[in-house]
Amino acid sequence: MPWAYIDQTGKIKIDAYFKEAGKHSEGIAKIKMNGKWGFIDRLGGMLLQPKYDDAGNFNHGLAPVALNGKWGFINIEGETIIPFDYDYAWDFQEELAAVSIDRKWGFINPEGKTVFKPQLDFVWSMSENKIIASLKNVWYCFGRNGKIIYKPNFDFVGSFHDGMAKVNIGGKRIGHRLIQGGKWGFIDRTGKIIVRPQYDFVWNFSEKTAGVYQKENDSWIFIDPNGQTVLSVKAESLKPFNEGLAPAEINGKWGYINSSGKMQIETLFLDAGDFSEGLAPVRVEDKKNDG
């Protein structure tokens, strides 16, 4: 089923041609057609033809892309700015990009210079001047200078968003990025538990709220940074608020609710992504061959 883009009224602004579609960043979105990734502008015009095996988002004028099993960074013209030397690479965040070589992670700057030598087992992108990383199954919080600030004692630690990072206790790690079971809560920038681990699933904080799920009563709510309920929503699934709207699944279809919990964009879609720069990718019924 193809993906299209809608505006905040729910009107389709870019038609459904894409096998997959990402959010807009710096006016550019990654899209997938014929098994390859390329980039479009806000009007749906093709900026870079799909030819990459994988791709991230543009930030600081650069996007990570993969070709023949290696990652590098390109500019908006498609020129290689940072060579394809990496086994994996993430978007630039706060002027640093996480890169992997020989299963170890470090960071480079937009000039391609190594800022932190790849030596960690796993890292999240730089967020709010902090790096959350893992080494030998121990989590660390580093500052921008590479010095250890503290060691969060949890089974899983996410990156910081709105001053909060999600944490898990009791879950089983599946690789570095996934964890099964356990309970989820949140810590602040100092590592202090603000919302005790009690939920079965949580999204990162966004626009000062976080969507959380409790399996026991099959309920979704949004909480504030103090852990207080700010919104209860009867939905099968929810995603975070972005630009005032949050995707919500009801009866197998996705729409968008506003901060009052009112359905602002009807549940017409098979899936729905976050709003960014006034547009959101949505999955629609297949009316034509998208390649």
Image (cartoon, rainbow, N blue to C red):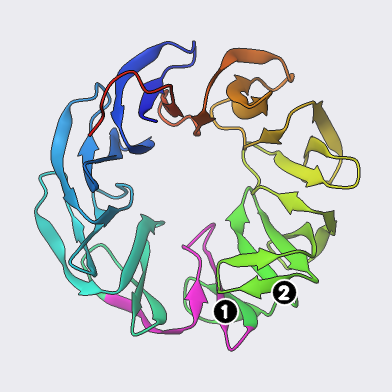
Residue 95 seen in the current view: no
Q: Secondary structure at mark 2?
A: loop
> Which residue is at the front of the view, 221 or 217?
217
Q: Position of residue 286 (x, y in %)?
A: 37, 23
Quarter of the image with the N terminus is top left
Q: Is residue 227 left or right of residue 258?
A: right
Taking the view exactly as shown, the residue that stands out farthest to the right is 217
The magenta stretch spans which residues?
A: 114-137
**Vertical order, 210 against 245 (above or below):** below
The amino acid on which the numbered mark 1 sits, given as a three-letter code, is Ser
Does 270 appear in magenta?
no
Q: Residue at x 71, y 42 (%)?
A: 210
Q: Tell me the residue that label 2 is attached to.
A: 155
Q: Residue, x 66% and y 45% (percent of image)?
A: 205
Within 10 Å of disc 1 (Cα), the crowding (few <14, some 14-19, many 20+) is: many
Q: Is residue 68 above or below residue 194?
A: below
Q: Position of residue 264 (x, y in %)?
A: 61, 13
**Residue at 68% across, 62% down:** 189
What amino acid is labelled 2 in the image?
A: Asp
In magenta stretch: residue 135: yes
Q: Main secondary structure of the magenta part?
A: strand
Q: Residues within 10 Å of mark 2 (few under 14, many from 20)?
A: some
In x, y percent, where is residue 54?
28, 55
**Residue 74 circle label:** none
Q: Earlier in the sequence, mark 2 or mark 1?
A: 1
The disc placed on residue 134 is 1
